Image: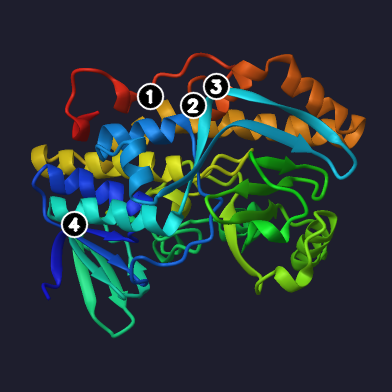
Amino acid sequence: MDKRHDVIICGCGPAGATAGLALARRGHSVLMLDKARFPRPKLCGGLLTWKSVRLLETVFHESVPGLTEAGVITHVSDRYTIRTPASLLTSGAMPYPFHFIDRSRLDARLLDHAARAGAKVMLGARVTACDPGGGSTPARLTLADGTVLEADHLIGADGANSVVRNSFLGHDRDRFNQFMAPAIEVTLDPAALPEPVECPELYVGFIEAGYGWVFPGQDRVLVGLCGLRRGKVKFSNLFRDFLDFLKIDSRAVPPLRGHPLPYGNALENPVCGHAMLVGDAGGFVEPLFGEGIFYAMCTGLYAGEAVASALEDGQAPGPLYTARLRRDISPELRGSDRLRWLLFRAMKLVGPRSLSLFVNTGSTRLAEMVHGRRSFSWLRRKQWDFLKPGLPASDK
């Protein structure tokens, strides 16, 4: 194996696969690494919004019918409910449906797109150390078997526990961890629930800054809980209380599995030396509902295109990447974070009816905001730059 590469992408999930595809389509050599072997199990609510579907169509040339036929999309619903432990807060229809997916199949399919475009993929390669380099010093990755790889450009797409991020000089680990939310999710047979689940159900009030969910699928139901930890409460006990509330027989529940979710800690500057961060590695998760798939793909696209431009015309990729983030991504995450704390604090002071009033006052506009047709920044119409007409997909 060559030890020196133009570009290395650490992580082959949606963020890494989108970055790899953007680079490979423009003819650049790229090596993609992941400690797992695909398809691999992945804990995730697995919900695609309108903006996610549009990006898949525009960048990956995937369609809803094609993803459904491939078993990636397992359920579609244009309705929702929001509940508290005591009552139904609101329910209704949306102007665009949610598409629920098998996350393992989606990730494998996106990675296959990058590989078929020409990206070299190395699975089962665990990165144990990183040096982002700088100036004339290349970025370096050390693998578990002792192999050292060098790259002129490095994209860290290695998730919430990113080795690449932890190598950044001046990275505030304490602050990042302060806003890292534990999440627990289980997959159940629909018969394990007392009533059929026809549409996505959100539950507020079980945790101060977070929510629970029950998401339907073709032949399964996903039940999960996510939120910021407060005090010394054991999160697994909160989740079991949630399952008890749902009247789910504990004998039907598999062993609990959890994972951390960035929840309001997106980095202002996800660039260090020759490395940049995308997706969960940079904290790019929408902090109200925890949507991560879209922001993983979109930041991966931006990073891949920034590095491609750097290879083609000698520009530094960092400023190109951060400029697009600050224009299109950061306002959404900041607006979502403001809205999150407004709603959670209102519920604490006034009660759950404050959320019901907020949702019912402008349900269509709020649904458009969640789907990305309006911005979290004052509900203005949102124009994503990858949807601009007249440009090839890899340049949008």
Residue type (three-letter) at the residue carrying disc 4: Ala
Q: From the top left corner, tell me how far across and down residue 94 is, in percent.
A: 59, 24
Indicate how the structure is coloured in the image: rainbow
- Does label 1 or label 4 sit earlier along the sequence? 4
Vertical position of residue 282 compared to residue 367: above or below: below
Work out whether mark 2 precedes mark 1 in sequence or the reverse, and give the earlier one: 2
Q: Residue at x 62, y 40 (%)?
A: 289
Query: SS at mark 1?
Result: loop
Report the residue at 52% width, 35% height from top. 98
Circle 1 is placed at which residue position? 384
**Whole-Å distance between the Cαs marked 2 and 1?**
9 Å
Q: Residues at badges 2 and 1 in contact (C-beta under 8 Å)?
A: yes
In space, the residues marked 1 and 4 are separated at their CA atoms by 26 Å
Quadrant location, the N terminus: bottom left
Q: Secondary structure at mark 2?
A: loop
Discs 1/4, front: 4
Which of marks 4 and 3 precedes in the sequence? Answer: 4
Amino acid type shown at disc 1: Trp
The residue lying at 36 percent from left, 72 percent from top is: 35
Which kind of residue does numbered mark 3 sit on?
A: Glu
Residue tagged by mark 2? 372
Task: Classify mark 3: helix, strand or loop.
Answer: helix
Residue named by callout 4: 115
Residue receiving disc 3: 368
